Amino acid sequence: MDIESLILPGLIAMAVGLAIWGAFSLAGGQNREKKRLSQRLGNESSTEQQITDQFKPLLRVTAVSGVPQFLANKSFIQSLNRKLLQASPGSSLGKLFSLAFILAFVTFFVAFAVGGSLAVSAVGAAIAGYLPFFHLNGKCNKRQRQMADQLPEALDFLSRVLRAGHSFSTGLQMMADELPQPLAGEFRRCYDQHSLGQPLDESLKDTAGRVDNTDFSFFVTALLIQRQTGGDLSEVLGNISHMIRGRIRLQNQVRAKTAEGRFTGYILVAFPAVMFGLVYTQNPEYCHKLLTGDGRYLLGIALGLQMAGLFTIKKITTIKV
């Protein structure tokens, strides 16, 4: 393939990429919430010329930044923004989409340049473009597992603080200082929001929305009810901690009993690919028919069925507790 045949596709891809990147960049300026909060903080403190680093993360609590306004209210954008706030609070959706596009563009151009067909290049670009979202989802899942494991100890800690005679706000600050990350960071943001003047109920609801954990939602709901009805909060926290520990123990038992099925699925998917690679290295001509002509369609169907089988096994072995 000569260089002249690559110029037109490259220019088209570059033009489309620059247009998309420019649209996201122009639309991804400071949002209205950030401007209003910056003005409020600036008016309240005439001696300070800038916001301290402690409160800078609060400028983007839940607002969607880096995407055009007509997309900001879409459900999938809101879901992505929630995950981004969980996994990387300092980033924005505009950066995420820009990274995905750059990976897709580079992969498409390289695959097409080395002689790949348009369809193969497009598939490779789609896979490369999905990698940032796959990585984001993995970070969110890991973070949620860490917070779920830390939550019972955090509730026990808060219960002991309340029994010692401290207020709930003081308990939030002590949890932010003493607990490990990532749960301590969420309590720190909750405490900072409350310190800036936001009602405690709203701060807790915002934290529950960011954490997106069922057990944490139980904790916030019980806390809000207790603030309205009264009662011994330390006892309530102890009961919730006991319930969460039971759920975690049951989840671990379920994962242990379904581990064999999960690994069976992984082996069934990996085994044909490994065997194909071994046979191809020993006798390339034997596999030549699968890589040319109608063999490519058969290979594509086989890969699709393999992915469908893996998805089915994953659905069967995933039991929500």
Image (tube, rainbow, N blue to C red):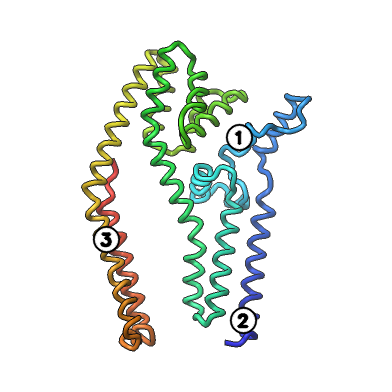
Marks 3 and 1, how far apart in space? 43 Å
Position of 172 relative to 97 (above/below): above
In the picture of the structure, the residue carrying the numbered disc 2 is 6
Mark 3: few, some, or many residues within 10 Å (few <14, many ≥20)?
some
Marks 2 and 3, how far apart in space? 41 Å
Q: How many marks?
A: 3
Q: Quadrant of residue 157?
A: top left
Marks 1 and 2, how far apart in space? 47 Å
Q: Are marks 2 and 3 in contact (CB under 8 Å)?
A: no
Q: Quadrant of residue 39?
A: top right
Relative to the observer, which residue lies in front, 36 or 232? 232
In the picture of the structure, the residue carrying the numbered disc 3 is 265
Please say whether residue 78 is visible from this viewpoint. Answer: no
- Quadrant of image for the C terminus: top left
The answer to whether residue 53 is left or right of residue 263 is: right
Where residue 221 appears, x then y in whole percent?
41, 27
In the picture of the structure, the residue carrying the numbered disc 1 is 58
Mark 1 or 2 closer to N-term? 2
Task: Check disc 1 and give the amino acid type.
Answer: Leu
Q: Secondary structure at mark 3?
A: helix
Outermost top residue: 165
Name the residue at 67% across, 52% down. Answer: 27
